[in-house]
Image: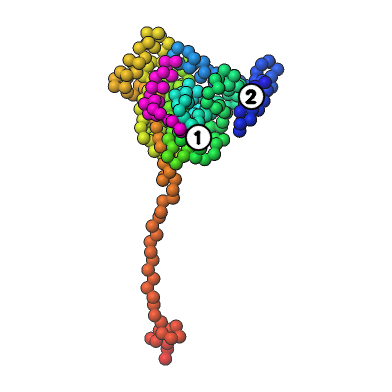
Amino acid sequence: MTGEWRGGRHLELPAIGRDRGSAAPCYIRTMLDDVQAVADFYSSRRGRVAVQQLRRHLLRIWPDLAGQAVLGIGHATPFLPLWQKRALLCVDASTGGAGSAAWLARLALRAPAAAPARCLVQDDALPFSDLAFDRVLMIHALESATHAGDMLRAAWHALRSDGRVLIVVPNRTGLWAHSESTPFADGTPYSTGRIERLLARCLFRVERMQGALYVPPTGLRPVLRAGSMLEAAGRYVTPRLAGVLVVEAVKDVYAALPVATTTRRVRIRPVLLPVGGVPASRSGA
């Protein structure tokens, strides 16, 4: 049996694909394979280099989140420990679908006691109350969402009035979005203009945007060892070849307020009529 967390309760789920006679649909096994593929990538040498470089960029933007509630959406497991010790609350919300249940159960057995709380959510319906979080980190989420706009609106409601969202999406012109052996090639890559327009439609205001992962998506050890040097040089030499875009946006509360419309005043000029309601010139007397 495998488990799934919902609303603070542990629900038992049937085992998935253990034998040929299993009635589990094929798409559930496919989702499980996708989620496991992301976890396997980050446990590889190339994935560890990617985590190291992405962590540096995230810490430059959010160096300290002491006393704040943080929500990670997608696959934020390697990055939430950056703020776990000083944050008031850290929640790791996986959007991998039904196949993520078994992976979450195995991860919970290996996780330390101080690990972030983990749950399985729908990408367009977060099971949290409004104004519950100060910060939202989205990675491996927006590009693979069924409706990216609905996911951002759900995050908008979960954020407090001054909340901020940090989004990591594959760069359309980068090398990582075209390397099928990495999870950054899954889903829809974004350009700077497209992510800005999407955030504006979902009532977010972009504060900063920068590129990351200038290291080529290769497994060659000499290239991976020079990852920090290549990352620093790529920002100036090949800025358009960044593997991902790191976007920080603030919740635009005023954009959700109705705009006051000005109405044109119509002045009515009174017309005086004689007693009887008919002008004297037309009385026929």
Q: Which sits in the foreground, 47 or 67? A: 67
Neighbour class for label 2 at 10 Å: few (<14), some, many (≥20)?
many
Residue 80 placement (x, y as % from top left): 47, 25
Q: Quadrant of residue 12?
A: top right
Is residue 52 among the parts visible in the rendering?
yes
Residue behind mark 2: 3
Residue 257 among magenta residues: no
Residue 75 locus on image (x, y percent) = 50, 24
Please provide the residue range marked out in magenta.
48-71
Q: Is residue 229 above or below residue 94?
A: above
The amino acid type found where label 2 is placed reads Gly
Dot 1 falls on a residue whose secondary structure is helix
Element assignment for label 2: strand
52 part of magenta stretch: yes
Separation (CA) of disc 2 from disc 1: 25 Å
Q: Which residue is mark 1?
A: 151
Q: Is residue 24 above or below residue 255?
A: above
Give the residue drawn at x 48%, y 17%.
42
Comparing 69 with 151, the one in front is 69
Residue at the spot 43% in from the left edge and 19% down from the top edge: 51
Disc 1 marks a residue whose amino acid type is Met
Residue that sits furthest to the right in the current view: 21
Which numbered mark, 2 or 1, is in the foreground of this view?
Answer: 2
For the point 31% across and 22% down, which residue is it? 235
Mark 1 or mark 2, which is nearer the start of the sequence?
Answer: 2
Residue 149 visible from this viewpoint: no
The reply, left or right, for residue 88 in relation to residue 120 is left
Mark 2 vs 1: CB contact within 8 A: no
Q: Report the quarter where the N terminus lies.
A: top right
Which residue sits at x=40%, y=26%? 58
Residue 257, placed above or below residue 12 = below
User: How far across and down, in percent of the image, does residue 212 sit?
Assistant: 37, 23
